């Protein structure tokens, strides 16, 4: 089956540049990153920081001007089971970037566990939720090199499912689905650490999750409302800087 190609709809400001904008314009005092890998995004932070990855591959200066940087080489599930990020940071998480395992249930758990340590004014950014091709949405990473893929080597998995899930179970959340290259960036705000809708319904959400077929990908792209990364107004995000 021939691959689809939606790259023109996700060709805006690169996601690393958009994350840099978020850091510079909102000035978080605490930052959590799940899925650090090479360190290209965690190095943007200049505040107290936690990085979680089962295997760090950083070959760049990720410390920079950070007053503290705590690195945990373990899975995100193990991290949240064993540690209290808000206690480590000394305050709620102001900004989080979730880019861990590219499977829906992992991202959903990461979101649930992260929000518990946020405040209403905090921001959670999600990566890879606008996959421009079909084969990269497979749950099998081997399909990243499918001979019919228009994006050889790209694997976003099925984390795109987080968007319709949040829309259904957490409609009060604010979501900006940015066209950041190459696979989008979702900026979530209006958080509620006391809301348990996702955790209560977790089992049924996962049980009802189905593999994406090509027609479903077309439908998904037709249903999402995409915002230009260049046009995002960060003014209303600045409130969390006043958290004590």
Image (spheres, rainbow, N blue to C red):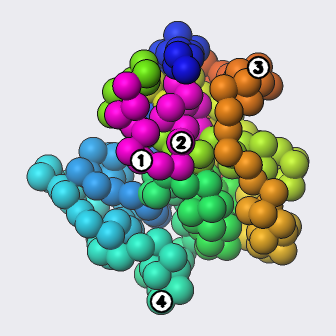
Disc number placed over residue 82 in the picture, else none: 4
Say which label, 2 or 4, has the lower sequence index: 4
| Residue at 35% in and 34% down | 145
Tell me if residue 231 comes above or below residue 96 in the rendering.
above
The Cα atoms of the two marked residues, 2 and 4, are separated by 31 Å
Disc number placed over residue 141 in the picture, else none: 1
The answer to if 223 sits in the magenta stretch is no
Extreme residue toward the bottom, this view: 82
Neighbourhood count class around disc 2 (C-alpha, 10 Å): few under 14, some 14–19, many 20 upward: some
Nearer to me, 244 or 26: 26
The magenta segment is 127-147
| Residue at 46% in and 58% down | 101
Please indicate whether residue 188 sits to the left or right of residue 85 in the image: right
Disc number placed over residue 138 in the picture, else none: 2
Say which label, 2 or 3, has the lower sequence index: 2
Residue 136, image x and y in percent? 48, 35
Q: Nearer the viewer, mark 3 or mark 1?
A: 1
The Cα atoms of the two marked residues, 2 and 3, are separated by 19 Å
Q: Nearer the viewer, mark 2 or mark 3?
A: 2
Disc number placed over residue 222 in the picture, else none: 3
Residue 76, image x and y in percent? 47, 71
- Where disc 2 sits, the SS reads loop
Residue 35, image x and y in percent? 39, 58
| Residue at 59% in and 45% down | 158
Neighbourhood count class around disc 3 (C-alpha, 10 Å): few under 14, some 14–19, many 20 upward: few
- Where disc 1 sits, the SS reads helix
Tell me if residue 167 comes above or below residue 105 in the rendering.
above
């Amino acid at each position: 089956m021939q691959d689809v190609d939606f790259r023109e709809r996700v060709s805006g400001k690169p996601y690393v540049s958009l994350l840099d904008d978020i850091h510079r314009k909102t000035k978080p005092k605490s930052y959590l990153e799940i899925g650090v890998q090479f360190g290209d995004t965690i190095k943007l932070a200049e505040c107290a920081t936690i990085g979680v990855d089962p295997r760090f591959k950083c070959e760049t200066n990720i410390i920079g001007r950070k007053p503290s940087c705590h690195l945990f080489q373990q899975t995100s599930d193990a991290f949240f089971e064993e540690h209290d990020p808000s206690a480590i940071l000394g305050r709620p998480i102001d900004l989080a970037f979730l880019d861990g395992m590219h499977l829906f249930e992992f991202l959903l758990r990461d979101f649930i566990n992260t929000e518990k340590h946020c405040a209403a004014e905090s921001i959670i950014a999600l990566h890879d939720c606008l996959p421009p091709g079909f084969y990269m949405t497979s749950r099998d990473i081997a399909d990243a090199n499918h001979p019919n893929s228009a994006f050889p080597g790209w694997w976003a998995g099925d984390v795109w499912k987080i968007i319709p899930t949040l829309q259904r179970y957490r409609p009060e959340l604010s979501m900006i689905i940015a066209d950041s290259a190459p696979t989008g960036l979702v900026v979530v705000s209006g958080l509620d650490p006391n809301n348990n809708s996702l955790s209560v319904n977790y089992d049924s959400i996962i049980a009802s999750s189905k593999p994406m077929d090509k027609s479903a990908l077309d439908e998904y792209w037709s249903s999402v409302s995409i915002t230009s990364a260049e046009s995002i107004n960060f003014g209303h995000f600045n409130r969390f800087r006043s958290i004590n």
